[in-house]
Each structure stands twice: as structure tokens, then as C-alpha cells.
Amino acid sequence: MASKSLVIFDLDGTLLNTIDDLGNACNHALQTLGFPTHSISSYPFYVGNGVSRLIERVLPDENRSKLDIERVRREFIAYYDQHDHDYSVPYDGILPLLTELTARGVNIAVASNKYQRAVTRLIEHYFGEFKWVSVRGQEEPRPVKPDPSVVFQNLLDFPTPKSDVLYVGDSGVDMETARRACVDSVGVTWGFRPVKELRENYATHIIDHPLQILDLL
């Protein structure tokens, strides 16, 4: 395996445990518009493919029209923009990992399906002391992961041979994104999805603690 000089991280479920804030924002939007809400414990299986797909999944089958999805999305974003760090926290070991990567001269980037404004704000709020070479969230018309376009954008921002890249995420969507981008993947077991999903989507590596990434460089 080639030495790695760039580590690209997914955000939700990988760097940050954001599930309470995501679930609260979604439930607020649903309740505001008169739709049923969901338990926070159900949200790890709704997230991962961007806000519009999240909204589609939480709406009743008969209310998944483009109009209803857009109505709920607007309410979600208005609330989430004000409450995106009420309960979200970095996972244990993430801050020491980023510190060590930076000390070793390994570059770090973000590739998320969350909308760009929120990604920028969360990275600045929780990880603003670190130098990020590329911070990319969802922007129209670029498709969401597992389409690899966001990773290609990272590599446009900071050109790096694909053999020198590790892509780190917590879901099958992330592993498929890395596969399509032709970069090595690292599936993390502390996030929102089960390890079975990581294996089924051909994770190159699977780790149980952030600092294990250092062994893969």
C-alpha cells in the first residue's frame, strides 16, 4: 500500500455525532407541517444521502411529493441552521487523530452529503484550529454520494495521486463513494451504520477507533 498524504473524511457519523441535532431538526419540521415524527434512535438509518433524501425517508409514503419534500426541507434547514451544534460532539479520538495527522504533515479534507453552508459552519465550529485543504458539502448541481464527484472536487482543490488518498466514512454510501473514486476506503464502526454494511460495500479497511487510521498511512 502506498503511503498516504491525504485523508478525506465524511462528516456526520465519522467526525461528528450529529444524530440528535439532525433528528430534532427533522422532527421540528415534520411537526410544524403536521406530519408524524420519529424517535431519535431511528434516524441513523434515515441519514446519509443528503437532506432531500432524509426528508423523503421520514415522510409518510403518501406525502413524498416534490412539493412536500421541499416544504419540509425548508423548515428543516431554517431550524438546523440555528441548532446544528446544540448536541453534536466530535467522536472520542477524533481531535487527537487530527492533531497527529497535522503534526505528521498529512493533509485533511471533508466530503459530505450535508449542504455546504452547514458543513462549513460545523467544521469551523468544532475543528477550526486545523488546516483543511478542502471542505466540500453538497452543492447543486453536483450529485450526492455515492457519486464520487465530491471526492473529485476534493482532488481538484488539492491535487493528490489517488494511490495516496484514504477516504474515511461510516456507511455503505461512503465505501461505495471511495470505490467509484478509485481510492482506498476506511470504514469506521463508531458511526451510524453497522459493520455488516461496511463489509458488504467492500471497505478496504475497517477500524474501531480513530487513532487506528495512523497505522494505515
Image (cartoon, rainbow, N blue to C red):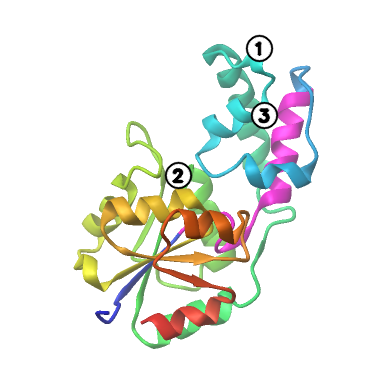
Q: Depth check: 18 or 2 in front? A: 2
Residue 172 against residue 42 in the figure, above or below: below
What residue is shown at x 78% (from left), y 17% (from top)? 34
Left or right of residue 17, residue 94 in this image:
left
x then y, percent, for residue 87: 74, 55
Q: Residues at badges 2 and 3 in contact (C-beta under 8 Å)?
A: no
| 116 magenta-colored | no
Local SS, label 3: helix
Which residue position is annotated with label 3? 58
First-in-chain label (2 vs 3): 3
x then y, percent, for residue 54: 59, 34
Amino acid bearing label 1? Glu
Q: CA distance from mark 1 to mark 3?
A: 11 Å
Q: CA distance from mark 2 to mark 3?
A: 22 Å
Q: Depth check: 138 or 58 in front? A: 58
First-in-chain label (2 vs 1): 1
Amino acid bearing label 3? Val
Amino acid bearing label 2? Gln
Which residue position is annotated with label 1? 62
Pointer 2: residues within 10 angstroms few (<14), some, or many (20+)?
A: some
Residue 75 against residue 217 in the figure, above or below: above
What residue is shown at x 35% (from left), y 56% (from top)? 178
Local SS, label 2: helix
Q: CA distance from mark 2 to mark 1?
A: 30 Å
Residue 202 against residue 163 in the figure, above or below: above
Residue 67 against residue 98 in the figure, above or below: above
x then y, percent, for residue 164: 25, 73
Which residue position is annotated with label 2? 116
| Quadrant of the drawing holding the C terminus | bottom left
